[in-house]
Amino acid sequence: MKPDQWREVMRADLDSIFNMTHQVFPGMRERGFGRIVFQALRLRLEDPLPLAGEGRR
Protein backbone atom coordinates (compact mmCIF):
# COMPACT_ATOMS: atom_id res chain seq x y z
CA MET A 1 0.00 0.00 0.00
CA LYS A 2 1.32 3.40 -0.91
CA PRO A 3 1.28 6.28 1.62
CA ASP A 4 -1.48 8.15 -0.23
CA GLN A 5 -3.63 5.02 -0.24
CA TRP A 6 -3.03 4.59 3.51
CA ARG A 7 -4.06 8.21 4.13
CA GLU A 8 -7.27 7.74 2.13
CA VAL A 9 -8.20 4.62 4.12
CA MET A 10 -7.46 6.34 7.42
CA ARG A 11 -9.34 9.49 6.38
CA ALA A 12 -12.43 7.48 5.47
CA ASP A 13 -12.31 5.52 8.74
CA LEU A 14 -11.69 8.50 11.00
CA ASP A 15 -14.15 10.78 9.20
CA SER A 16 -16.89 8.18 9.66
CA ILE A 17 -16.14 8.01 13.39
CA PHE A 18 -16.25 11.79 13.69
CA ASN A 19 -19.48 12.11 11.67
CA MET A 20 -21.31 9.41 13.64
CA THR A 21 -20.15 10.80 17.00
CA HIS A 22 -21.14 14.31 15.95
CA GLN A 23 -24.69 13.08 15.29
CA VAL A 24 -25.28 11.12 18.52
CA PHE A 25 -23.37 13.14 21.12
CA PRO A 26 -25.95 15.92 21.63
CA GLY A 27 -28.64 13.39 22.62
CA MET A 28 -26.23 11.60 24.92
CA ARG A 29 -25.30 14.86 26.58
CA GLU A 30 -28.97 15.79 27.00
CA ARG A 31 -29.74 12.41 28.63
CA GLY A 32 -26.56 12.54 30.71
CA PHE A 33 -25.62 9.07 29.53
CA GLY A 34 -24.50 7.18 26.48
CA ARG A 35 -21.86 4.88 25.10
CA ILE A 36 -20.05 4.90 21.80
CA VAL A 37 -18.26 1.71 20.83
CA PHE A 38 -16.16 1.54 17.70
CA GLN A 39 -15.11 -1.66 15.99
CA ALA A 40 -11.71 -1.97 14.34
CA LEU A 41 -11.65 -1.68 10.59
CA ARG A 42 -11.62 -4.68 8.31
CA LEU A 43 -8.26 -5.66 6.90
CA ARG A 44 -8.25 -6.24 3.18
CA LEU A 45 -4.84 -7.08 1.76
CA GLU A 46 -5.59 -7.30 -1.94
CA ASP A 47 -7.16 -3.89 -2.68
CA PRO A 48 -7.64 -1.37 0.14
CA LEU A 49 -9.14 1.44 -1.95
CA PRO A 50 -12.65 -0.02 -2.36
CA LEU A 51 -12.79 -0.20 1.44
CA ALA A 52 -12.05 3.52 1.68
CA GLY A 53 -14.66 4.37 -0.93
CA GLU A 54 -17.51 2.10 0.18
CA GLY A 55 -20.71 4.02 0.73
CA ARG A 56 -19.40 7.07 -1.10
CA ARG A 57 -20.94 7.99 -4.42
Image (cartoon, rainbow, N blue to C red):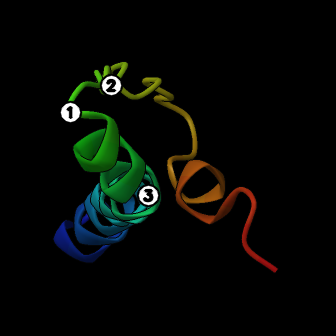
22 sits left or right of 57 in the view: left
The mark lying in front, picked from 2 and 1, is 1
Residue at the image position 31 percent from the left and 51 percent from the top: 25
Amino acid at circle 2? Phe
Q: Which residue is mark 2?
A: 38
Cα separation between marks 2 and 3: 10 Å
Q: Which residue is mark 1?
A: 32
Q: Secondary structure at mark 2?
A: loop
Q: Residues within 10 Å of mark 1 (few under 14, many from 20)?
A: few
Q: Is residue 34 left or right of residue 19?
A: left
Check residue 52 in the rendering and tell me which mark sits there, or answer none: none
Name the foreground residue: 39 vs 21: 21
Q: Give the residue type that dot 3 points to.
A: Ser
Name which of mark 2 and mark 3 comes first in the sequence.
3
Q: CA distance from mark 2 to mark 1?
A: 20 Å
Q: Quadrant of residue 11?
A: bottom left
Vertical position of residue 33 compared to residue 18: above or below: above
